[in-house]
Image: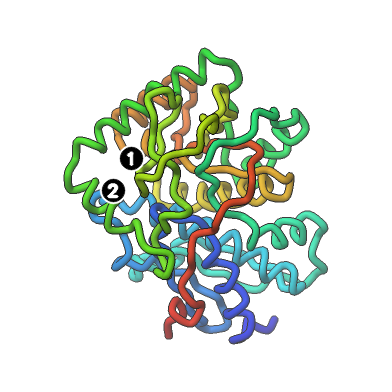
């Protein structure tokens, strides 16, 4: 079976760079080797303070892998993915090799079409509830990638999650090194990475239920409080090894693209995962044997500005 070519690499990378990453650091690289598309972690873009374990890089690379898979699938060239195929190359996260050719499914085409429309929506959502059928689709999307998604329904679990998230946020706010690193990724709109001021959340206010990262100090418009009962979902995996985190990244992106395809928006809540004690508290509160990897706030909202991306030629290596 013929391997992938340069044009396949370019298409996979162009889709891969649209994946989310913590503070929009874009910690990935792509290369073509022996007919396979390989996705690597870029250690120069790992957050030294917020991501000293490499968890966020692996989640991001897993999400980029999901996008690359979809880009190849819609060409009729589906991929078989092997995570961490060469332990002598620790930055090599995933290898995509050609599977038997076939037409793309309707679901693959719909998710691929959602890639350029997906971006984090950090502003308040409308009060309209997410329909039950859509909620089932999100749970199924995570399950399709060997992960789980718990939707927090009712004020008791939601209030419990909010307290864990706010507590973790307070811990991170007390860390001056963390805050300095965060500020370094809040950029003007002309930067090719980081979070533009226009795409950041408005400044937090005391009545907010969930924490928001302070990428900007702009105030929200009067009457634009955050929704009092947001739909919060926690994405998790059975294990917590590097390969499990890569799988969770794939599941995260599939969920986010399903959110977008359904006409919804989402923002990511990582503070409870970044603080180990909060993560363990969250795991116990869910009564799960697995490991939470990220939380999401999901709802309806006006499309906001998307975060920038580097040119695809900047992420391709030999």
As drawn, 160 above or below 111 = above
Residue found at x 55% / y 56%? 305
Is residue 110 shown left or right of residue 235?
right
Dot 2: element = loop
Q: Nearer the viewer, residue 87 or 129?
A: 129
Q: What is the quadrant of residue 202 in the picture?
A: top left
Q: How many marks?
A: 2
The local crowd at label 1, few if under 14, some if 14 to 19, many if 20 or more residues have their Cα within 10 Å, is: many
Residue 50, labelled with which disc? 2
Pinpoint residue 15: horizontal percent, then vertical percent. 60, 68
Q: Nearer the viewer, residue 256 or 191?
A: 191
Which quadrant: the N terminus? Answer: bottom right
As drawn, 171 above or below 216 = above
Dot 1: element = helix
Residue located farthest toward the front when viewing the structure as drawn: 222
Residue found at x 57% / y 41%? 147
Pinpoint residue 302: horizontal percent, then vertical percent. 64, 46
Pinpoint residue 44: horizontal percent, then vertical percent. 29, 68
Is residue 54 shown left or right of residue 94?
left
Q: CA distance from mark 1 to mark 2?
A: 7 Å
Pinpoint residue 100: horizontal percent, then vertical percent. 74, 71
Q: What is the quadrant of residue 113 in the picture?
A: bottom right
Residue found at x 50% / y 39%? 237
Q: Nearer the viewer, residue 312 or 8?
A: 312
Q: Nearer the viewer, residue 86 or 137?
A: 137
Residue found at x 52% / y 67%? 17
The local crowd at label 2, few if under 14, some if 14 to 19, many if 20 or more residues have their Cα within 10 Å, is: many
Residue located farthest toward the left when viewing the structure as drawn: 176
Evaluate if marks 1 and 2 touch, with contact meaning CB atoms under 8 Å apart. Answer: yes
Residue linked to disc 1: 274
As drawn, 99 above or below 24 = below
């Amino acid at each position: 079976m013929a391997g992938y070519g340069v044009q396949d690499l370019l298409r996979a990378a162009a889709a891969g760079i649209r994946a989310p990453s913590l503070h929009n650091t874009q910690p990935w690289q792509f290369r073509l080797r022996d007919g396979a598309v390989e996705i690597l972690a870029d250690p120069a873009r790992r957050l030294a303070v917020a991501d000293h374990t490499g968890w966020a890089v692996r989640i991001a690379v897993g999400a980029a892998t999901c996008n690359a898979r979809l880009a190849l699938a819609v060409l009729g060239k589906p991929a078989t993915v092997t995570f961490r195929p060469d332990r002598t190359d620790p930055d090599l996260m995933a290898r995509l090799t050609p599977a038997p050719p076939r037409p793309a499914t309707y679901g693959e085409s719909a998710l691929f079409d959602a890639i350029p429309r997906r971006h984090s929506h950090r502003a308040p959502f409308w009060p309209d509830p997410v329909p039950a059928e859509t909620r089932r689709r999100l749970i199924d999307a995570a399950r399709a990638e060997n992960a789980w998604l718990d939707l927090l329904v009712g004020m008791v679990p939601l209030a419990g999650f909010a307290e864990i998230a706010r507590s973790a946020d307070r811990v991170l706010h007390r860390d001056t090194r963390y805050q300095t690193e965060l500020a370094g990724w809040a950029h003007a709109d002309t930067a090719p990475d980081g979070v533009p001021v226009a795409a950041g959340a408005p400044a937090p206010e005391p009545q907010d239920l969930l924490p928001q990262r302070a990428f900007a100090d702009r105030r929200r418009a009067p009457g634009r409080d955050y929704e009092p009962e947001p739909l919060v979902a926690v994405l998790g995996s059975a294990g917590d090894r590097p390969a499990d985190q890569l799988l969770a990244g794939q599941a995260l992106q599939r969920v986010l693209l399903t959110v977008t395809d359904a006409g919804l928006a989402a923002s990511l809540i990582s503070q409870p995962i970044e603080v180990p004690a909060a993560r363990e508290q969250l795991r116990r509160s869910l009564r799960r044997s697995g490991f939470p990897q990220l939380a999401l706030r999901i709802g309806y909202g006006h499309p906001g500005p998307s975060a920038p991306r580097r040119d695809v030629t900047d992420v391709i290596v030999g």
